[in-house]
Image (spheres, helix red, strand yellow):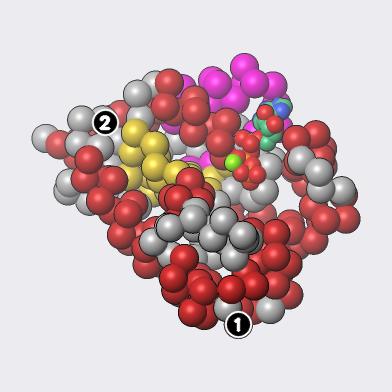
Amino acid sequence: MSVPASPDMPLHPAQLCIGLTGGIGCGKSTVARLFESHGAGIIDTDEIAHQLTQPGGQAIASIRAAFGPDYLTDTGALDRTRMRQLIFSDTDARRKLENILHPQILAISASRLATHARVPYVILMVPLLLENPCFMQLVQRVLLVDCTEKNQIERVKQRSQLDETEIRAIITQQLAPEIRIARADDIIQNDGTHDELENQVAAMHDCYLRLSHRNTI
Ligand SMILES: Nc1ncnc2c1ncn2[C@@H]1O[C@H](COP(=O)(O)OP(=O)(O)OP(=O)(O)O)[C@@H](O)[C@H]1O
Ligand SMILES: [Mg+2]
């Protein structure tokens, strides 16, 4: 089921930017690839975060200053496993890391948005968009990819080393689905086949094309 975009939404004058969000394993990356095949521009904040935390990355000096060298690997990248373990249970550490990364991710996303001038609209992938409202300033609409917890667990289990207990712990840390649904403008319910998912994305793409057209005339 998809909820069509309302053509009467007030929009940012420059570029239609849709924030794509959803819980772990709900299908965000798959949906983003489908939008890309329709010609949408894609900005992936996870990829930007990886880039910032590679050896020599823009965020590394601040991470070293805030957390010490123990949270860097031998090559000077962020030790993601170690940091994930720390911030999973330590809210202050999580905030400290977010205060370093989020302003940089935001600035890079904004500059990439400006380079996407030739696409009808941009999909900004922010897994925790609704948990981190600072990213809302870049988007005009929120598109949620949702699926049942059962599908979430099965799909994540198939593609990663995480076991069911670990997956459930991550899901518990994220916003509850009913809160996400209440805050989203548009919803793609990804509990069916890939063909059904493709059809939902195609319908949503048509809505966004209409919105982006209204945005430029
Ligand atoms: N409708 C579907 N039917 C079956 N498998 C699916 C469906 N949609 C996505 N998948 C599979 O589920 C897994 C998770 O999908 P995807 O990587 O797109 O989710 P994600 O939300 O980006 O995950 P993450 O939160 O880890 O980034 C992938 O292996 C994908 O191929
Ligand atoms: Mg993904």
Mark 2: C-beta under 8 Å from nearest atom of ligand 1: no
Is residue 62 at least partly visible in the picture? yes
Quarter of the rendered image showing ligand 1: top right
- Residue 100 appears left or right of 171: left
Residue 135: image quadrant is bottom left
The residue closer to the viewer here, 107 or 51, is 51
Q: Which numbered marker is on residue 92?
A: 1
Q: Is residue 41 above or below residue 107?
A: above
At mark 1, the secondary structure is helix
Residue lying farthest front?
Answer: 74
146 left or right of 115 in image: right
Residue at 39% from the left image edge and 37% from the top image edge: 42
The x and y percentages for residue 50 are: 51, 51
* Residue 124 position within the rendered picture, expressed as x and y whole percent measured from the top left: 41, 45
Q: Is residue 29 or residue 78 the one in the foreground?
A: 78
Q: Which amino acid does label 2 sit on?
A: Pro
Q: Which quadrant, please, contains the N terminus?
A: top right
In the picture provided, is 36 more to the left or to the right than 63? left
The crowding category of the residue bearing disc 1, from other C-alpha atoms within 10 Å (few below 14, some 14 to 19, many at least 20), is few
Q: Which residue is drawn at 21% across and 45% down?
A: 114
The quadrant of the picture occupied by the C terminus is top left
In this rendered view, identify the residue nearer to me: 199 or 136. Answer: 136
Q: Find out whether residue 211 is within the magenta segment.
A: no
Q: What stretch is highlighted in magenta?
A: 182-204
Q: Which quarter of the picture shows residue 210?
A: top left
Which amino acid, mark 1? Answer: Asp
Quick one: label 1 or label 2, which is nearer the N terminus? 1
Examine the rendered structure and indicate whether residue 94 appears above or below residue 109.
Answer: below
Q: Name the residue under label 2.
A: 120
Residue 186, magenta (yes or no): yes
Residue shown at 70% from the left, 65% from the top: 82
